[in-house]
Structures are given as C-alpha cells and as structure tokens.
Amino acid sequence: MRIRKSKRQSAWEFMRRNQTFSIGDVMMITQMKEESMRLFLRQLVRAAKVKCLSKRNVALKKKRYLVLDARCVVCPVNSQGGNHET
Amino acid sequence: MKNNIFVQTENFTQILELVNRMENDALSSEKLGLVYGNFGVGKTFAIEKVLNEKNGIMLTAQAHWSVKNVLQNILIEICEPTLGTTNDLFERVCDTFPSSGRGVIVIDEADFLIKNNHYQMIEVIRGIHDKIHIPILLVGMESLRARIQMRPHLYSRFPDANIVNVKPLGIKDIETLASFADVVIETDLVEHIAKTKANFREAKNVIKKCENICELQDLDSLDLRTFSKLHKG
C-alpha cells in the first residue's frame, strides 16, 4: 500500500536532506503556497527544528534556513499548530 | 523572471518516466536503475522533484560510509530500529521495507558505494533488490556506469531502458526556461545560450541579465545582435 505524502511532509524531507536550504527551493520542489510555507516555518522555528540564517529584511523566498534536528523522519509539526515528536 | 518555477527539462521527464517504469514493472523483472551525468546539469533537483511525486526515500551516500551505514540509513528513513549486526539490519530492511508504504529507494552520490574497487556496499543494494524486488535508483557521476560495468553480474541487473545519461541542457530546455522570462528572448539568442551555457544556473543568470538589459533600454524583446552590443557595452 502506497501512502500519499502531504506537502508538509515533502517539504520536511527536502529540508532534512539538504540541512541548509533556501525557502525558494522548497517552494519550487513542493509547490507549497507562500502563506502555508510561512506558517509551517513559524511552527518549525518555534519547535526548534530549524533556524533562520538570513537577516530579517530578506524576502521569504531568498531566506536560508538550517535544520537543527534532522532525526524526525515524520514532519515534526502538524497543520493544527501543535507539535509531535516521532 | 518568475521565481521558483520548476522547469521540466528533458532530463527530468526521462527520470520521471524511468521511475514510473521501474515501479510498474512486473515483480520478477529487474528494477535497478542508474542515472549518471556531469555535475551542474540538475540531476539532484530533478530527483528531488520526482521524489516529491513518489513516496520514496532518498539517501545521499558519503565517502566514509560502510555497509552498515547504508542499511542503517535505509532503516532510519522507514522508522525502524538500527541496532544489531549487519546481517540483522539487512534482514530487517528486507522484512520491513515492503510494508513501509515507501515505493522507491534513491541513492544519490552512488559513486561512494564503490570504494577502491571494493563493491560490498553496492552488492548489498543488489542483495536487497534481488530479495524483495523494490525499485532502487542509483545516481552518480559519469564514471559510475563504467565502474558498474566492470562487474558483469551486477551490470546485467540494470536493463538498458533503466539507464539514463543526464545530458547538458538542450535548445528545448533553454526555450522553456526563456518562456518564463518577463521579456521575449528571440530564437537566435536562445540558440546562443544553449551553445554557450550548458549549466542550468548559468543559463538562468544570462536570462536574468537579458531582462535587466530590456528594463534599462526599455525593450520588449531581445535578439542576439542587440544582446551582444549592449552586453559588451
């Protein structure tokens, strides 16, 4: 049985594989909308899974992030805003 | 130029077709695939995009990896414990992967699976394939094919249809890329870019340069003559 991945899961897998990544690349690969990506990133930063490497005034798509904890295979934050560890 | 548009190059289409074919082939047929080519032609990004559509796992092989590391990394991706002897791990991969819901294993930088003519790691991959018949795609540099060819019993498991040579960008790819530009780039200029810039990133930079020239000169389209004149000037 093949399980279909959510966009968040695809984005998280891309981030884990690349360690440092630009949001533009994640959006290009996953076709995630800017608003969804913004919310997702906010949750990941709050959960201390990623950290922003760019200055605040840089456009979202050009911002670079660093994955702090790549152990979670399953996306560590869910769409309701809560967190879960795997 | 529209940002973050994924240009579906011929290479991407070939890789996507390959993965589809490997997934849909009969259970008994060979499902080992090979994608090889020079750096900078968009292999990894194409694979990332394909994996986004398929529920597969992707490992990036490292120079220090051993057989155990290969197996442990597969197990991590399917959320299985990684403790035990190499044989335990091999059996665990074979027992649990089919029920993990994952479709394909992609190994990037697969050149690192063959070290100083030691083929153990790639033989383990072959072992997994032979035992559970899952599609496994190896991605590497130009020399990878030749190195696998040195082992006929291994190479025979890669059907010709499952081998993709990733080529530098062609005119069609540049045309597609140019179609996303904010200005019209004439055919002669597209041909010039295709001839001089085989690397995706470089081609994209030239197109951005064309847009800047058009903006400064208030032009709607750009041909090779105007580009050469204004670019040098």
Image (cartoon, coloured by chain):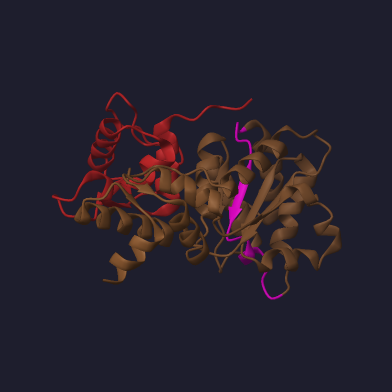
Chain colours: A red, B brown
Q: Which residue is at a point 40% across and 35% down the rendered structure image?
A: A31
Residue A52 sits inside the magenta stretch: no
Q: Is residue B33 left or right of residue B6?
A: right
Residue B157, horizontal then vertical, whole percent: 81, 52
Residue most toward the bottom?
B116
User: Measuring 29% from the left and 23% from the top, which residue is drawn there?
Assistant: A80
What is the magenta range? Answer: B100-116
Among all residues in the image, which is located at the extreme left? A57
Please state the horizontal and vertical placement of residue A63, each as a whole percent of the image: 25, 50
Q: Residue at x 52, y 53 (%)?
A: B44
- The answer to whether one can see residue A71 in this image is no
Q: Is B101 a magenta residue? A: yes
Left or right: A5 in relation to A66 = right
The quarter of the picture where residue B146 lies is bottom right
Locate the C terminus of chain B and report the quarter of the image it occupies.
bottom left
Question: Does B147 sit above or below residue B188?
Answer: below
Count up the numbered dots.
Answer: 0
Indicate the position of residue B124 as horizontal and vertical percent values. Answer: 73, 56
Can the viewer see residue B70 in this picture?
yes
A4 left or right of B160 in image: left
Task: Name the residue at 59% across, 49% down.
Answer: B11
